[in-house]
Image: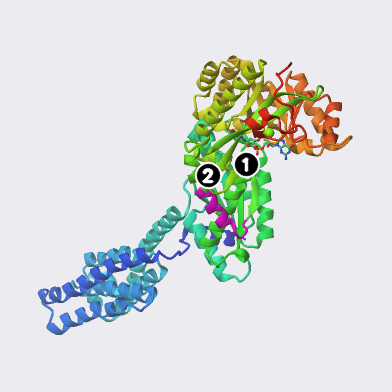
């Protein structure tokens, strides 16, 4: 058992024997070949200069030069070529020792050669060197001791001194092996987490794919909103988060699987198994990371987007293809709202291309006048009348027609275009509300969605103040809707901004309540006036159902915090009746009116009543 452990420890010190990349190997081989060639050329004249006969000089030239004929063979494998070069280099050592009558200093040449052949990062040259030293010193040392050793002790015991010299060569070889190992580590490991890097991951995947006929899978794992953690908590905290995630990833995989950090906040896992195994591991990872991560003494909740691809759905058995597919699936996971796992399916490549085109088109959408604002009424349930409207952006794409926000808002959020779009919507919607209010002579509420980026990347407070001043709309008529997602960003800045907005008199609504990952303590911290219960809870409302209990608790909670409640996505009379029973104050949904362009509301050609003053 202990022997086993010792063996394992020693093995860990040795290089894994990874082959050098072809280009690097050839570069090094060329240099060594030149050195060996130069030695072959110089050895002949040196022999003559030292008073040797012409045949001896020719013999030396042949001994050093001939192996190079194999070393330069273009069709030969790496092993033959590096072996032949090693033999040539060592032949020069032997010749030098011979020409200098066994002079001890001449033996130093062996060590130079060991250093040179170490550049091959291959075991064979070390073996050859050791063998040559033992045989040369032992056999020649016995037959002609003066050609090998320069001192009397060795002349009497050539094998003992062959052993001593061999031990030094072995020691030098081990030192080179150690640095070879270090080279391997540095070239294959991520310095921060110690996980495999991309090179090693691709190598492992390729090896599995080539060795086995069975399926191999890859998980592509990307942290959600990692940049915000870095920005708000600092890079040291970011590093600590990456380390913690690396640990959790490690704990979720099996012995044969390889976890790698590809760079930044991207990780990947090569799974020696099919898609089902990979999905199981991926789900385990999601669960493991869902637990708050202790970072800098404060817990942090972070989501992961995971893409899974396997060799059964790939066009070929190449690691690059698997990784690319898994990457596409990961992007899909991001697009679907992050913090989830998505399996690669055919067509994702096309979809990704479409999204990229859409993203590029988005850059000009605002200026090209392709954006529109639709308005959806909010009603007061008890009285059944419209108290205001929510502004919902639409994109009239020149080729695709009307694109819903679910498709382009996440893209715009990612690229930053949302800031420009958001400004435009705010301006448009507030102007519309002011016009409606002026037209009817009654105050009318308007709600505008704010994306997380607008709270951190834009001077939103000044913009809101300006547009209110410009249009004359009283601040109390404007509601800004934010999702719990804003809390993933720089929490303190966001909360300060929201306080400043409220100080203007604007109301803040928490949109899609219940879908984010914020805890109740956040709800206490977030300065808000309204919670909007997400459609997913409203959808399942029926008397006595589980959603009903949940919605009832949210309403109770909101009431205790003095918040107004709006139920989103009410489509049926049953849902409306249940909400009425739960004394929910406001609602929104197709039952009362779909989002429509402003003029449709003015014409009143929809289910909702034309604008009625808020609170009137
Ligand atoms: P949201 O703010 O929660 O808006 C409500 C969404 O639910 C709207 O989708 C609306 O059309 C839809 N909806 C309303 N009632 C019903 C219903 O009874 N049944 C169903 N099935 N759906 C209903 P829409 O317009 O597609 O907008 C989706 C999301 O896009 C919005 O969710 C909001 O988060 C975002 N969004 C829209 N406009 C903007 C904007 O100007 N800026 C930003 N940052 N985000 C926006
Ligand atoms: Mg909204
Ligand atoms: Mg909503």
Secondary structure mostly seen in the magenta stretch: helix
Using the numbered discs, state the Cα–Cα distance from disc 1 to disc 2 in whole angstroms.
25 Å
In the picture provided, is 127 more to the left or to the right than 475? Answer: left
Residue 50: where, in percent of width, then height? 12, 74
Looking at the rendering, which quadrant does residue 507 occupy? top right
Looking at the rendering, which quadrant does residue 442 occupy? top right
Mark 1 / mark 2, whichever is N-terminal: 2
Q: Name the residue that disc number 1 marks.
A: 406
Residue 8: where, in percent of width, then height? 55, 60
> In the rendered view, would you say 579 is above or below 139?
above
Residue occupying the point 57% across, 54% down: 351
Residue 521: where, in percent of width, then height? 69, 26
Q: Which stretch is magenta?
A: 344-357
Residue occupying the point 35% across, 72% down: 82
Q: Name the residue that disc number 2 marks.
A: 265
In the picture provided, is 533 more to the left or to the right than 231? Answer: right
Around disc 1, counting alpha carbons within 10 Å, would you say few (fewer than 14), some (14 to 19), or many (20 or more)?
A: few
Location of the N terminus (image quadrant): bottom right
> In the rendered view, would you say 417 is above or below 194?
above
Q: Is mark 1 within 8 Å of ligand 1?
A: yes
Residue 522: where, in percent of width, then height? 66, 26
**Residue 331 counted in the magenta span:** no
Frontmost of labels 1 and 2 is 1
The answer to whether residue 235 is visible is yes
Q: Is label 1 in a helix, a strand or a loop? A: helix
Query: Camera-side residue: 78 or 319?
Result: 319
**Residue 351 counted in the magenta span:** yes
């Amino acid at each position: 058992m202990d022997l086993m452990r010792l063996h394992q420890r020693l093995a860990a010190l040795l290089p894994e024997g990874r082959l050098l990349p072809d280009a690097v190997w050839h570069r090094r081989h060329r240099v060594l070949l030149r050195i060996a060639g130069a030695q072959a050329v110089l050895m002949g004249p040196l022999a003559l200069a030292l008073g040797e006969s012409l045949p001896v000089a020719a013999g030396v030239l042949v001994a050093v030069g001939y192996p190079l004929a194999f070393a330069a063979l273009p069709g030969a494998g790496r092993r033959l070529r590096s072996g032949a070069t090693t033999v040539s280099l060592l032949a020069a050592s032997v010749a030098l020792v011979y020409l200098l009558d066994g002079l001890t200093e001449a033996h130093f040449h062996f060590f130079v050669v060991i250093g040179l052949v170490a550049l091959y990062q291959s075991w064979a040259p070390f073996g050859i060197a050791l063998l040559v030293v033992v045989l040369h010193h032992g056999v020649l040392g016995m037959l002609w001791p003066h050609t090998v050793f320069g001192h009397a002790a060795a002349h009497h015991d050539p094998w003992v001194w062959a052993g001593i010299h061999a031990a030094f060569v072995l020691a030098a070889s081990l030192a080179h092996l150690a640095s070879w190992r270090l080279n391997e580590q540095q070239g294959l490991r991520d310095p921060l987490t110690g996980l495999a890097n991309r090179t090693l991951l691709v190598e492992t995947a390729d090896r599995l794919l080539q060795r086995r006929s069975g399926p191999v899978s890859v998980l592509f794992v990307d942290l959600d909103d990692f940049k915000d953690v870095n920005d708000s908590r600092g890079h040291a905290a970011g590093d600590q988060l990456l380390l913690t995630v690396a640990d959790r990833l490690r704990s979720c995989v099996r012995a044969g699987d390889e976890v790698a950090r590809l760079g930044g906040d991207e990780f990947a896992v090569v799974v020696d198994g099919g898609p089902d195994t990979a999905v199981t591991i991926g789900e385990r990872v999601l669960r493991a990371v869902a637990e708050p991560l202790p970072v800098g003494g404060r817990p942090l909740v972070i989501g992961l987007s995971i893409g899974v691809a396997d060799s059964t759905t790939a066009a070929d058995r190449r690691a690059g293809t698997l990784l690319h597919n898994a990457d596409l699936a990961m992007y899909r996971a991001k697009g679907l709202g992050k913090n989830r796992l998505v399996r690669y399916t055919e067509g994702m490549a096309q979809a990704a291309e479409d999204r990229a085109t859409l993203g590029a088109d988005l850059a000009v959408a605002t200026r090209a006048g392709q954006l529109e604002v639709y308005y959806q009424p909010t009603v007061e349930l008890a009285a059944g009348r419209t108290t205001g409207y929510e502004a919902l952006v639409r994109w009239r794409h020149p080729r695709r027609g009307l694109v819903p926000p679910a498709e382009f808002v996440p893209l715009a959020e990612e690229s930053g275009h949302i800031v420009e779009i958001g400004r435009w919507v705010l301006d448009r919607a507030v102007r519309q509300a002011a016009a409606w209010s002026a037209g009817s002579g009654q105050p009318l509420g308007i709600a505008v969605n704010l994306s997380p980026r607008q709270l951190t990347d834009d001077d939103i407070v000044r913009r809101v103040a300006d547009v209110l001043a410009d249009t004359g709309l009283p601040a109390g008529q404007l509601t800004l809707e934010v999702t719990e997602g804003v809390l993933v960003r720089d929490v303190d800045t966001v909360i300060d901004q929201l306080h400043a907005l409220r100080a203007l008199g604007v109301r803040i609504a928490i949109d899609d309540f219940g879908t984010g990952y914020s805890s109740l303590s956040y709800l206490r911290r977030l300065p808000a006036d309204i919670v909007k219960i997400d459609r997913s809870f409203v959808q399942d409302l029926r008397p006595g159902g589980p959603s009903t209990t949940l919605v009832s608790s949210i309403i109770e909670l909101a009431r205790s915090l003095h918040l107004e409640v709006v139920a989103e996505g009410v489509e049926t009379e049953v849902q409306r009746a249940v909400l009425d029973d739960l004394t929910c104050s406001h609602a929104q949904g197709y039952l009362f009116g779909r989002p429509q362009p402003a003029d449709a509301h003015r014409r009143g050609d929809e289910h909702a009543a034309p604008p009625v003053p808020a609170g009137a």
